[in-house]
Amino acid sequence: MKEEALFEKRLLDLSSQAFGQGRYTFSNFLDLYEQSILLSLKGQSRGISWKLFGGYEGAERRMVRFGSMEELGYEQEFPLSLLHIKIQGGKFSRKLSHRNYLGALMHLGIERNLIGDILVMDQEAYVFVKDTIGPFLMQEWTRVGSVLITLEEIPLQEFDYEPEFEEIKGFCSSFRTDVMVGFFCRTSRKESSDLIKGQKVFVNGTLIVSNSHLLKEGDILSVRGYGKAVFSQITGQSKKGRYAVCMKKYI
C-alpha cells in the first residue's frame, strides 16, 4: 500500500540521517502495526542500530531511536514526557476511561502519533507524550469532558508501574493463532480468522498473517479492539486432548 511504503521510506530516512550525520534520530510514537513494519526492515537500516521505547517496560506504543552510544559516542534520551493526571473531586467524580482521556487529547488538536500509552487507574491516570507538547498540555489541558483535572510532569526515573491482570482460564484444541484469538476474544473461528486477515492481531509486537502460527507460553497476544494478554501457562490436558490454558489479560 502507498501509506505503508511512505512509512517505510520515513523510517529508512531516519536511519540514513543517523548514519550519515552521526546523530540520534527519533520517530513519533508507533502503534503495533508500525512497529511490525519496522521489524520487517531489518537489514535495510544502513548498519545503524535502533531501539524501541515507550517510557516504561511493556509499553505498547513506542518511539524508535536510531543510533547508540557505541556508534555515536554519546547518549541521548528519548524525547518523551510523562504527565500524571489527577481528577478533581476524588471519589465523587465519575470514573474516566482510556477513551475519555484520548478523546480529550484529540479534542485539543493533538495528533495521535504524539501520544503514547495512557494508563488509567481509579481517580488518576498517566499519559506519555512527545516532549514538545508537554508544556502546551500542562497549560491548556484542564478537563476531560465535564470533569476537571490537574496535571503534573513526572520524571521517568520516578515512575514505578506494575500492570494488573485478569486471569482467563479454559480449554483450547491447539495453540494456533486463530484458536487462541478465539479463546481470548470469545469469538468464533471465522471471526478470529477475519481479525487476522484484517491485520489486527500481533504476537510479541509482530503482525501475524497466518492462522496456523503457534503461540507458546510467555507470548504476548494483542488484538486491536480487544486488548492484550500474556499466554501465561498450560496447566494440563483433558482426556479428549484439549489443553487447559491460562491467559493474563492486561486491565
Image (tube, rainbow, N blue to C red):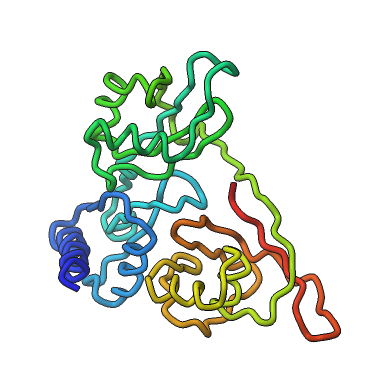
Looking at the image, residue 108 sits to the left or right of residue 86; the answer is: left
Above or below for 242 versus 156: below
Q: Quadrant of the N terminus?
A: bottom left
Toward the viewer: 203 or 132?
203
Identify the residue at image location x=24%, y=70%.
45
Which percent across, then down, holds residue 181?
56, 70
Identify the residue at image location x=58%, y=70%.
182
Above or below for 242 versus 28: below
Toward the viewer: 49 or 10?
10
Looking at the image, residue 225 sits to the left or right of residue 131; the answer is: right
Looking at the image, residue 100 sits to the left or right of residue 23; the answer is: right
Above or below for 130 versus 188: above
Which percent across, then down, holds residue 82?
40, 33
Which percent across, then down, holds residue 150?
41, 18
Identify the residue at image location x=36%, y=35%.
81
Which percent across, then down, holds residue 121?
56, 33
